[in-house]
Amino acid sequence: MTEHREAILDQFTRQAIPFATAPSIRDEAALRLIVEWSGAGPDDTVLDVACGPGLVVAAFARVARHVTGIDLTPAMLERARAHVAEQGLTNVSWRQGDVLPLPWPDASFTIVHARFAFHHFLDPFAVLKEMKRVCAPGGTVMVVDSAPAPDKADAFNGMERLRDPSHVRALPIDEHLELFRRAGLQEPRVTTYRLEGELESLLARSFPRPGDADVIRRLFAESLADDALGIQTRRDGDVLRYGFPVAVIAARP
């Protein structure tokens, strides 16, 4: 646990600015989809779990009454504070710390959300149960994360662990849904969007161990022929591009 926590702090202290400024992470259409899928409105209080650089916090804050972001990494929260200040948003608060357990009483929020966080959790089921606990009756629990095809998940996760040593496992959609069922959430609503990017930009905002970036380049190049990673790699001139599905899952507690 301590070793994994240190890996997260190391990666996301260094990734704070490059992650926050990546076009695929800042994608306004994806942020709008998340907010719309949640049904957020002016009476809602939102918790963003592992909020990172505050992009989702800001998107919710434009429509909700109040939004709280919690994250383990101080550098990410520093970036998040700067981002919402740039947006002129004041209905936001922050908490630095771990998400197990979440440091709020039962039923504290009407929407509890996490984006691109579950693949970093050693125990995503425990986190989902905590998200349910702090969500008020009639509210919404949301998870947004990469969702590899079941037959490609091992290869995808192997590549991602090379790229980011704090990565644990991205779950196929069916496994996400099974977590929701086990947590006692109501039948989820599911949609997807595609995260698009290009390999060298991805590596530039990642901090793989020495030599692993070249292994990743080889894996991407090999995947051009057989889609082994399940991320639909393609060449655009000298640029190697990719796209993969992101699941947006929402359910009532």
Image (cartoon, rainbow, N blue to C red):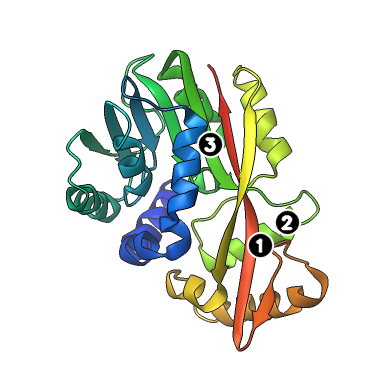
Residue at 72%, 54% (x, y): give it: 153
Query: Alpha carbon of mark 3 to alpha carbon of mark 1: how far?
Result: 22 Å
First-in-chain label (2 vs 3): 3
Task: Give the residue at mark 2.
Answer: 154
For this rendering, which residue is in front, 97 or 69?
69
Q: Is residue 248 visible?
A: yes
Q: Quadrant of residue 13?
A: bottom left
Q: Which mark, by number, is residue 158?
A: 1
Name the N-terminal-most of marks 3 and 1: 3
What residue is drawn where x is 63% and y is 88%?
237
| Left-right relation of 18 to 131 | left
Q: Is residue 146 above or below residue 22?
A: above
Residue 157, position as x, y percentages in the image: 65, 57
Residue 216 is situated, as x and y percent measured from the top left of the image, at 62, 75
At mark 1, the secondary structure is helix
Label 2 to label 1, Cα distance in Å? 6 Å
> Pointer 3: what residue?
143
Q: Nearer the viewer, mark 2 or mark 3?
A: 3
Q: Quadrant of residue 225?
A: bottom right
Which residue extends farthest bottom? 238
Separation (CA) of disc 2 from disc 3: 21 Å
| Label 2 crowd bin: few (<14), some (14–19), many (20+), radius 10 Å | some
Q: Report the side of 197 relative to 112 (left or right).
A: right
The amino acid sitting under disc 3 is Val
Residue 71 can be seen in this image:
no
177 vs 192, nearest the viewer:
192
Q: What's the mark number on residue 10?
A: none
Q: Secondary structure at mark 2?
A: helix
Q: Are marks 2 and 1 in contact (CB under 8 Å)?
A: yes
Q: Give how far across and how far down residue 80 sits, in percent.
A: 26, 50
